[in-house]
Amino acid sequence: MERQVTEDDALQLVLAVHRLNRTLRLSTTDLPPTQLIVLSLLAEHGPMRIGELAARVPCSQPTATTVVAVLEAAGLARREPDPADGRAVLIILTDEGQERITSVARREAELLDRRMAELEPDEREIVLAATPLLRRLAGR
């Protein structure tokens, strides 16, 4: 008989994923969450306007502008005119920004690898087998 997923099942999965993500992030980077999200979005989707970043984070446009200014001052992002609209600017990930986000991801993977080494072999296989399913659920 097929087991029905309850709302509580879904809630427990959301809480576990959030807790794991928070644990990995807090242990591997000093970047505030919104800065990390913006860098990740730029790395994954390429250059974007402030409004698009704000919608994807999600945050207000003034917050996105402030975050971009901090990333720009740190050399992790830069502004360039939008070739499609001379009145607008695109936010672009710099090489240093790409290196930073890649470094954070590697440190997160190393920490997760150490945590998974504490699991029983069959438990590790279950977690690894869930990866493609979690990607599908995330829409990628």
Image (tube, helix red, strand yellow):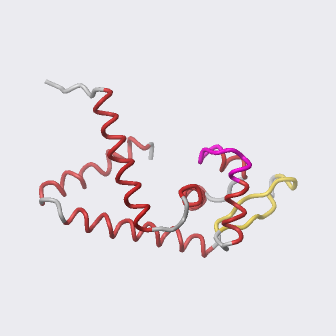
Residue at 41%, 70% (x, y): give it. Answer: 106
The mark total stands at 0
Q: Where is residue 3 in the image (x, y as percent from the top left)?
A: 19, 27
Residue at 68%, 65% (x, y): give it. Answer: 70
Q: Where is residue 13 in the image (x, y as percent from the top left)?
A: 31, 40
Q: Which quarter of the picture shows residue 4?
A: top left
The secondary structure that most of the magenta stretch takes on is helix
Residue 3's place in the image compared with 26, above or below, is above
**The residue stretch that appears in magenta:** 55-64
Residue 124's place in the image compared with 74, above or below, is above
Q: Where is residue 54 in the image (x, y as percent from the top left)?
A: 66, 47
Q: Which quarter of the picture shows residue 124?
A: bottom left
Residue at 35%, 46% (x, y): give it. Answer: 134
Closest to the observer: 94 or 6?
6
Find out whether residue 60 is within the magenta segment.
Answer: yes
Find out whether residue 37 is within the magenta segment.
Answer: no
Asked whether, in this view, residue 91 is left or right of residue 102, the answer is right
Asked whether, in this view, residue 124 is left or right of residue 69, the answer is left
